[in-house]
Amino acid sequence: MNNLLFIGNLGFQEILLIALIVLLLFGGRKIPELMSGLGKGIRAFKEGMNEVKKEVEDDASREDETKKQ
């Protein structure tokens, strides 16, 4: 499992090299747009998870109410 999580083995030089390659590929103007899209995606994912959690809690409370009756 630890072999799959290789990010922990990256040092400063490797991260800097990756950042430079990304900068060269996408340019300085595209990176803020990409990060903005990434932020919106993460926000939508969290909202979806919160909705599912709320639905599960609502279903559980409904089941508890029906058992009491």
Image: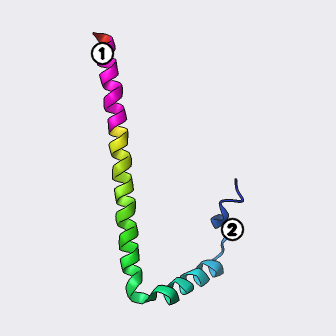
What is the three-letter code of the residue carrying label 2? Asn
Q: Nearer the viewer, residue 53 or 8?
A: 53
Main SS category, magenta section: helix
Please determine whether, in this image, residue 13 is positioned above or below residue 7: below
Residue at 54%, 82% (x, y): give it: 19
Closer to viewer: mark 2 or mark 1: 1
Q: Quadrant of residue 67?
A: top left
Residue 37 shown in magenta: no
User: Is 53 located above or below residue 25 in the figure?
Assistant: above
SS at mark 2? helix
Most extreme residue toward the top is 69
- What kind of element bears circle 1? helix
Which percent across, then down, holds residue 68? 30, 11
The answer to the question of whether label 2 and label 1 lie on touching residues, with beta carbons closer than 8 A, is no
Quadrant for the C terminus, please.
top left
**Left or right relative to 18: residue 41:** left
Q: Residue at x 64, y 81 (%)?
A: 13
Quarter of image, res 3: bottom right
**Residue at horizontal 33 percent and vertical 28 percent from the top:** 59
Label at residue 34:
none
Q: Which residue is mark 1?
A: 66
Q: Which span of residues is magenta-colored?
A: 55-67
Residue type at the position of mark 1? Thr
Q: How many marks?
A: 2
Rendering coords of residue 18 (x, y %): 58, 80
Residue 11 screen position, x and y as percent = 66, 75
Work out whether 34 lies above or below 61: below
Residue that mark 2 sits on: 9
Seen in the picture, residue 56 relative to 25 is either above or below; the reply is above
* Quarter of the figure with residue 45: bottom left
